[in-house]
Amino acid sequence: MKYITGFFLSLLLISCNQKKESVVAKDDENKKSDTLEKIDIDKTLYSVYDLSRKTTAIVVNLNEEGTYKGAEFDKTFNDVNAKDSLFNVVENPKTHKMRNFEYYDTLGTYKLIRNKTLENQIKKIIQTSYYVYGTKGFSKITINNVVCGLDECRTNIIAFPIENFDVAKNGKPIFCSKQLLAINYQNSYFDIQKKVRDYDDQQSKNYDYKDNIKTKIFANLGDAYFSYNDDFMWGKDHGKSKCDFPGRAIYIVTKNKPITKFWVDGLDLFGIPCD
């Protein structure tokens, strides 16, 4: 059984009451409110990863039709690839036509390439900006570039590099949303984290593929707890990393009820299809 799976449900959204940063509301989406609203998680949440020493990006996995407008992203990519042969960067790197794409960043696990046609088409189906949430706070980020990372064995991705995210203030970037989520950053999630790790150990005991990176809880929205599994090394120096399956997840932890995994997203850096 594969360790990383993808699915979507719906996410509870509270409008703005953020501990680490004050936000001035400009529309109803960001006004203070005690009410709960349902939003479509597949159109709202995306993972954020350090893909190299110089590139941190919002990431969409290709070939996952059930999530993130997956079918729409796949169709757009496949249409461009049919004309511009983007997979030549993997299959025939010495013969690819440089006029069709350029290397954006080759320093990380993924050799990121930029194709103007793909960028223009993808920008038609994404937001111009997203709220990026780190381990300590958040910031609104504008999307300028679209790149992709292609591999014969690992998860293929489309990525939107982010700039000017204040890591000192907001911590490591973990995920993003198109709507502002009033998540809370508490000083400690020790008890909840222990319960979640016990749950993970039980759920993954028969998995064929997994690594030993423990789940870290960093924020919550009521009974929804936001987490990551990542050593943040694989993009910078994959040889020193012990993380083959970096991921992000939301767990629902309610008193006297079983823990449930509400949303999960991740990458296969091990290369399960080639094993």
Image: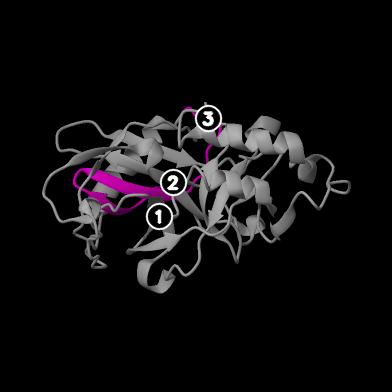
Decide: few, some or many residues near mark 3? Use Cα within 10 Å; few <14, some 14-19, many ≥20.
some
> Disc 3 marks which amino acid?
Ala
Sequence order check, earlier mark of 3 and 2: 2
Q: In which quarter of the image is the C terminus?
A: top right
> Disc 2 marks which amino acid?
Tyr
- Picture disc at residue 46: 2
Q: Is residue 162 visible?
A: yes
Question: Along the horizontal axis of the image, is 26 left or right of 92?
Answer: left
Spatial separation of the CA atoms under disc 2 and disc 1? 10 Å
The image quarter containing residue 183 is bottom left
Question: Along the horizontal axis of the image, is 100 left or right of 222?
Answer: right
- Tell me whether circle 2 and circle 1 mark residues in contact (CB < 8 Å): yes
Q: How many marks?
A: 3
Spatial separation of the CA atoms under disc 1 and disc 3? 21 Å
The segment highlighted magenta reads: 206-229
Name, please, the residue furthest toward the bottom.
Answer: 168
Decide: few, some or many residues near mark 1? Use Cα within 10 Å; few <14, some 14-19, many ≥20.
many
Rendered location of residue 195, percent (x, y): 27, 42
Q: Can residue 245 be seen in this view?
A: no
Name, please, the residue furthest toward the left.
Answer: 34
Residue visible at 25% across and 65% down in the picture? 23
SS assignment at label 2: strand
Decide: few, some or many residues near mark 2? Use Cα within 10 Å; few <14, some 14-19, many ≥20.
many
- Picture disc at residue 130: 1
Residue visible at 50% across and 66% down in the picture? 163
Residue visible at 68% across and 43% down in the picture? 150
Residue visible at 62% across and 59% down in the picture? 240
- Tell me whether circle 3 and circle 2 mark residues in contact (CB < 8 Å): no
> Disc 1 marks which amino acid?
Tyr
Sequence order check, earlier mark of 1 and 3: 3
- Picture disc at residue 71: 3
Spatial separation of the CA atoms under disc 3 and disc 2? 15 Å
